[in-house]
Amino acid sequence: MYSCPECEQVVNEARGLCPCCGAALTARAGTDRAGPQKTASFLSATLFWSVILAILWAIAWFALPWRMAGSKPAAESRARETLAVLQEGLAVYEVSEGSYPRALEALGDRARQAVQAAQSVQYALQYTFGNPDIDGRIKSYTLEARAGNSHCLNFYTDQTRVFRATREDRPATAQDPPLKPNL
């Protein structure tokens, strides 16, 4: 005796057809067919949930810009440190060359590493040199650090070495209040 694969009624093995539903009982492997179907169902469910979890993970990874930046104060501190390193490099360059450079690349590896540190905490840096004088020397510059996260400070500094900042969603300018204490 075994169960009919269609109606699950207990049926005598000797019969060829189920007396309840009329299904063919010749394939006694009906119970064997249920095994692979369950396995396939389990694999497809596992694959489905794996894909769903991967999608949710990807959304969380790209939706959270602070994932690598750490905390907001740490990101702001790193941006200020980067600006201070760049100011120091610019001052040394100005003393040795008599002019500020036209690009930050002229400051070397230390400046490049500082810029990369700021970028790692979602800050974009912009260096702008001032107008050259009659002799072609550049005597002024501006540095801006723009936060990728709208809730972080945006920084501004220039050759005066005064740091200015704003929390507004715009670049900081020379008209913004100075930070205390200045680096």
Image: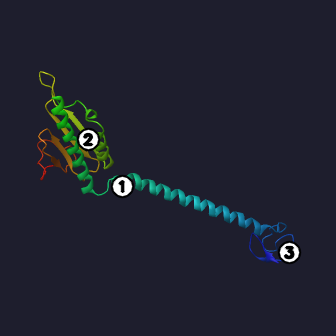
Please report whichever mark, 2 or 3, sits nearer to the chain's N-terminal start: 3
Pair 3/1: label in front: 1
Pair 2/3: label in front: 2
Look at the numbered disc 2 and give the secondary structure of its residue.
strand
Distance from the alpha carbon under mark 3 to that under mark 1: 64 Å
Q: Which residue is mark 2?
A: 125
Q: Which residue is mark 3?
A: 13
Please report whichever mark, 2 or 1, sits nearer to the chain's N-terminal start: 1
Give the residue type that dot 3 points to.
Glu
Pick whichever, 24 or 112, lies toward us: 112
Distance from the alpha carbon under mark 2 to that under mark 1: 20 Å
Pick whichever, 157 or 150, lies toward us: 157
Look at the numbered disc 1 and give the secondary structure of its residue.
helix
Sort mark 2 into few (<14), some (14-19) or many (20+) by Cα contacts within 10 Å. Answer: some
Residue in the picture at 48% in, 55% down: 55
Pick whichever, 67 or 14, lies toward us: 67
Relative to 125, residue 42 above or below: below
Name the residue furthest top.
Answer: 134
Q: Quadrant of the N terminus?
A: bottom right
Please report whichever mark, 3 or 1, sits nearer to the chain's N-terminal start: 3
Judge from the rendering whether residue 18 lies leftward or rightward of residue 84; answer left or right.
Answer: right
Pick whichever, 22 or 107, lies toward us: 107
Look at the numbered disc 3 and give the secondary structure of its residue.
loop
Give the residue type that dot 1 points to.
Arg
Residue in the picture at 24% in, 48% down: 79
Q: Residue 106: x and y, percent?
A: 26, 32
- Which disc is residue 67 wearing? 1
